[in-house]
Image: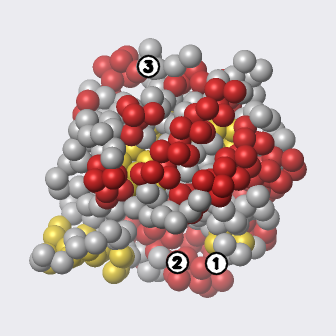
Amino acid sequence: MDSRQKFNSVMNFEEIASIPKVEFAYWAGTIRKWFDQGLPKIEDIAQGMLDSESVRGSRPVSDAYKDGVDKNVAAYFSLDSYLEKFPLDYSPMLKGTVIEENNEYKIFTDKFGLKNKVLKTRSSIPMVIDYPIKNRKDFYQYISLYDNSSSGIKKRLPDDFENLAADLKNRNFPIRLGGNPFGFSFLARHLMGEVTFMLSMYDDPEMLKEFNEFFLNFTMDYWSEIFRKIEVDCVFILEDIAYRSGSFISKEMFNTFMRPYYLRLIDFLKQHEIKNIFVDCDGLIDELIPLWIETGVTGLFPFEAVNDIVAVRNKYPALKMMGGFNKKVLFEGSTKQEIDRELARVFTVMKTGGYIPHIDHAVSEDVTWENFKYYRHNLNSLIDKI
């Protein structure tokens, strides 16, 4: 089986399923450190790539998108391709500008209109200094920048879309739609910031409903053009609405601000025969899982260490799952016994089907090459036993 066939066989809970051997991504800085620790170098990391940027564990949809794809780790362990994100642009397509730059940091606005600061001297994610939507007036001005006409939507498609679609018909790797920043809470937080988003639930709830209504319709128009030509294997809805202690919105908030839009989106996806509908949410998600399942969500990713994936599998045997290996047991100073215990935990779930094990998120620089090598070799062996 190729990577795509393996993915779909597992997601269908087939008896003859072959679990793909995959990793989601790695920090560029992680692979640079691993070169020094013994990883054979096939291709160097691009010089301009920041240590905190992700190197994908998937195959590119075309040569135009090959930058930032892992060539080294995949070759060493004979890994399959992870789900490759089909190129999407949810922004109003603004022209980004550099406001300030020196040897330590860069301050810039991006195509979403966010003002960001990124460090150059050490690994970090960008810090948002200012958000484009602070109130209802900003919201209306912001969505006026979008062209939802057929011609406007087609401008967002990759160059030479028709030929790309033809090339992808016989591909050997799975494709997904969605992910960062699409979601019925995440996108609003991305454009408003957490504080404005949370306060708007009380101060201006209708604005949040209008926000999700607009982007739901935008999404369905946008994705309809893609579904017309591309067979999509999976959809990701990004939310990240939980921390280590649980959800930071209530069930009532979910039902008011998110559930109606989930139901309509998932009905739309089912009309296009999409079978794998995943929510990407960090943190402790046990109280959110039944809410998502009720709307028609079929799978979840990731399963961070605060979640008990064995208990989740026992409670929701039909729920599809990805991730779930606790990367902290791969940090410097960890023992092989700790890694073995974590491998035994994921193996328990692997045997039940519908689960693809890997490290959650991009593998960080805390993970040593020696520990990763031990983990990956042994996980591959366990997969071969299934």
Per the image, label 3 sits on a secondary structure element best described as loop
Q: Which residue is mark 3?
A: 171
**The C terminus is located in which quarter?**
top right
Q: CA distance from mark 2 to mark 1?
A: 11 Å
Q: Is residue 205 shown above or below 332?
A: below
Q: Amino acid at mark 2?
A: Glu
First in sequence: mark 3 vs mark 2: 3
Q: Amino acid at mark 1?
A: Met
Indicate the quadrant where residue 239 lies.
bottom right
- Can residue 344 be seen here? yes
Q: Please give the name of the residue rendered at 17% of the width and 67% of the height, measured from the top-left corner.
A: 97
Whether label 3 touches label 2, CB < 8 Å:
no
First in sequence: mark 2 vs mark 1: 2
Q: Is residue 349 left or right of residue 208?
A: right
Q: CA distance from mark 3 to mark 1?
A: 44 Å
For the residue carrying disc 1, how many other residues have a C-alpha within 10 Å: few (<14), some (14-19), or many (20+)? some
Q: Amino acid at mark 3?
A: Arg
- Can residue 144 be seen here? no
Using the image as rendered, state which of residue 191 and residue 47 is in the foreground: 47
Indicate the quadrant where residue 269 lies.
top right
Q: Please give the name of the residue rendered at 46% of the width and 74% of the height, measured from the top-left corner.
A: 192
Q: Is residue 28 shown above or below 234?
A: below
The numbered dot on residue 194 is 2
The numbered dot on residue 201 is 1
Residue 29 placed where, x, y %?
Answer: 31, 58
Q: Is residue 214 shown above or below 78?
A: below
Q: Please give the name of the residue rendered at 21% of the width and 60% of the height, measured from the top-left corner.
A: 95
Whether label 3 touches label 1, CB < 8 Å:
no
Using the image as rendered, state which of residue 335 and residue 144 is in the foreground: 335
Residue 214 placed where, x, y %?
Answer: 52, 57
**The N terminus is located in which quarter?**
top right
Per the image, label 2 sits on a secondary structure element best described as helix
